[in-house]
Image (cartoon, rainbow, N blue to C red):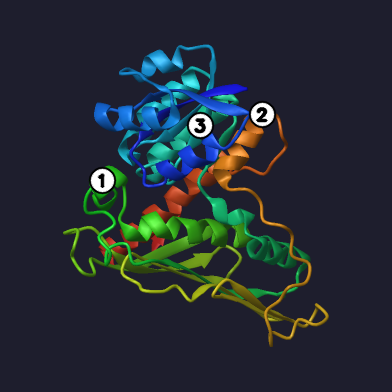
Amino acid sequence: MNSVAFLGCAHIHTPGFIKMISGRGDAKVKTVWDHDAARGQKRADDLSARFIGDYRTILSDPEIKAVIISSETDRHEELVLAATEAKKHLFVEKPLGMTGKDANKMADAIERAGVIFNTGYFRRGDPLHRFLKQQIDKGSFGQITRIRGSNCHSGALGGWFDTEWRWMADPKVAGCGAFGDLGTHSLDIMLWLLGEVEEATALLSTGTKRYGDCDETGEGLMRFKNGAMGTLAAAWDDLANVEALMISGTEGHASIVRNELFFTSKKVEGADGKSPWKTGLDAPLPHAFELFLDAINGKNVPLVKPREAAYRNVVMDALYEGAKQKKWIAVK
């Protein structure tokens, strides 16, 4: 059984990670660190683990094979660089960095260390997304002209970030607001499907202003290097997220509406878009966190590359800068 540790327990997904790892028999949390000792002790108690007041003590423990970094985003760089120096495998909650610059610095260190890495882009495991990637690779859409991703919920309307998770609505700590927090998931899928972006811009709003100057909603616009146009919606101010993804091409079209796929293609028999598509769908993959635990136990599973994670930061930087300057920003 692999011994692992938590370095930071601040993220809203931490309870879910605790539940997942507690249900496995091939990994056990030995130690927990958080700069907030009370929070760290609480999570250590949840895991029947030991709270340690200095994360360097954890990193020097030869029994610890991997660390789970679920801290505030502004602490990622320090923790990731220290963990790679100690040659620990890494699961780092998204986004990897505050900006593209620190994210690329972390990606460099992870690659040099040669350790296993994954981050929280769990939507790649969705059967509908996997099917669409297969069809794009086969050319079933012809030339793709437009793609739209949307990831919205009612977090600000419901006050999700009022208390324990308040830091997530402080861009100085989180690196972004709602647009970056939720948008990075749809952005990951869009980049995974269509590749790199040439330029980007966005329009952001503080919405209800529940969290002051933190953005609560936004729309981004991107030009992909393959010529396709992309739009990205993300918000904490929406009651529903009906159409999560749309792809339009010269020979095909797809929409994911209320978790059902409507697929049209001149090249695929039966793909008339009239009813939900069920043919050729693979089983869902485990959550990205579960895949990481599988990987450190020697299984060959698909993971997000550190450079991919950093590139999502780079593109998001351009979207935010475009909103700030009210112009197109080249993605470099």
Give the mark, 1 or 3, whose residue is nearer the N terminus: 3
Q: Position of residue 84 (x, y in %)?
A: 49, 23
Give the mark, 2 or 3, whose residue is nearer the N terminus: 3
Q: Amino acid at mark 2?
A: Asn
From the viewer's perspective, is 214 left or right of 190? left
Q: Are marks 1 and 3 in contact (CB under 8 Å)?
A: no
Question: Quick one: label 2, few (<14), some, or many (20+) residues within 10 Å?
Answer: few
Which of the numbered marks, if any, corresponds to residue 268? none
Mark 2 vs mark 3: give the one in front: 2
| 3D distance between C-alphas at marks 1 and 3 | 32 Å
Say which quarter of the image contains residue 321: bottom left
Q: Which residue is mark 3?
A: 108
Say which quarter of the image contains residue 214: bottom left
The residue sitting at 73% across, 73% down in the picture is 278
Q: Which residue is mark 1?
A: 164
Residue 162 visible: yes
Q: Position of residue 197 (x, y in %)?
A: 52, 59
Q: Position of residue 49 (x, y in %)?
A: 43, 23
Q: Amino acid at mark 1?
A: Glu
- Vertical position of residue 252 compared to residue 192: above or below: below
- Vertical position of residue 58 compared to residue 201: above or below: above
Question: Quick one: label 1, few (<14), some, or many (20+) residues within 10 Å?
Answer: few
Q: Which residue is mark 2?
A: 297
Q: Amino acid at mark 3?
A: Asp
Give the mark, 1 or 2, whose residue is nearer the N terminus: 1
Residue 327 visible: no
